[in-house]
Image (cartoon, rainbow, N blue to C red):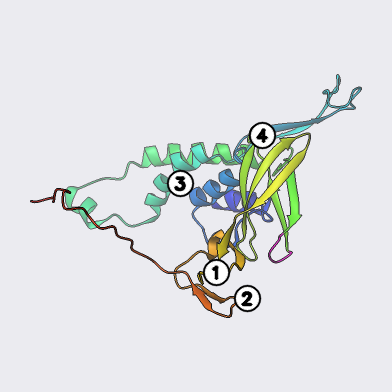
Amino acid sequence: MEALTYDRALAYKDEFPPSEYETWQPRKVMSVLLEIDPMADKDCSLAIGVEEQYGVPAPQMSPLGSEKVLSMKILKKHYDALGSYLHVQSMKQFRTGTVLDFDKFRNRCEEISEYASQVLTSSVFNVTLGSFSKINCAECDKPIRKRIPPGQSEVMAECFECKATYTLTDEGDGKIMWNPHQHEIKCANPDCDQKIFLWHHELEVGRHWTCKTCNVENSIVLGVSYKELSDNTPELTQ
């Protein structure tokens, strides 16, 4: 189950966040894959044909094969339960006299083996078709490639190189608008009108920069505001 899940993840290596590379539990890996592609754990069949009219499915299709995928449902059903048999019984299990049900364990192993055999004998393997949009990052110029899941008009994208983020909006006719998550920040000097743009991930306490116009240092800080109360404002008591 681990090997099949990791192999599935390799098919999405260009979309898999580097921060998740150290994740080894199959269920967590599959969760990341499903965020990238909701169809990542679904079985599929492939067929090709010549369109007689553009955009209209071909009247005659030739099958290429089918793929059985190790799904999240199977991982949830078997992975943790199977792992429990790999360890010595706990002290609590010894004290309570818990006995391993080897017949149940054998049935589970046979069910997993049958399912894994179907996956490994698929006539096509690791199918990852999809619609994509690609740009060079506005911050670091590295390419960003994002899958657009069917039925979604808006998705988020992140540059793995510099962490800049974007919202992708489907405008129809195959056009995708990339909107950077930037904020216009005015210099804190009231006598200066200089503005800069910061990415969303840069908005953190302690970040500072020097204004190129008035040469003062700006810093992002936490702040507390107040207002004076009138004499008629009732006080809260306990």
Looking at the image, how many numbered discs can be counted on the residues? 4
Classify residue 42 as left or right of residue 72: right
The answer to whether the residue labelled 4 contacts the one labelled 1, judged by CB atoms less than 8 Å apart, is no
> Residue at the location (92% across, 22% down)?
52
In the picture of the structure, the residue carrying the numbered disc 2 is 213
> Residue at the location (74% across, 64% down)?
141
Q: Is residue 139 above or below residue 110?
A: below
Q: Main secondary structure of the magenta part?
A: loop
State the CA–CA distance, disc 2 to disc 4.
47 Å
The answer to whether the residue labelled 2 contacts the one labelled 1, judged by CB atoms less than 8 Å apart, is yes
Q: Amino acid at mark 2?
A: Thr
**Residue furthest out toward the top:** 59
State the CA–CA distance, disc 4 to disc 1.
43 Å
Q: Amino acid at mark 1?
A: Cys
In the picture of the structure, the residue carrying the numbered disc 3 is 79
Q: Amino acid at mark 3?
A: Tyr
Per the image, label 4 sits on a secondary structure element best described as loop
x and y percentages locating residue 185 in the rendered image: 56, 63
Per the image, label 1 sits on a secondary structure element best described as loop
Foreground label between 2 and 4: 2
In the picture of the structure, the residue carrying the numbered disc 1 is 187
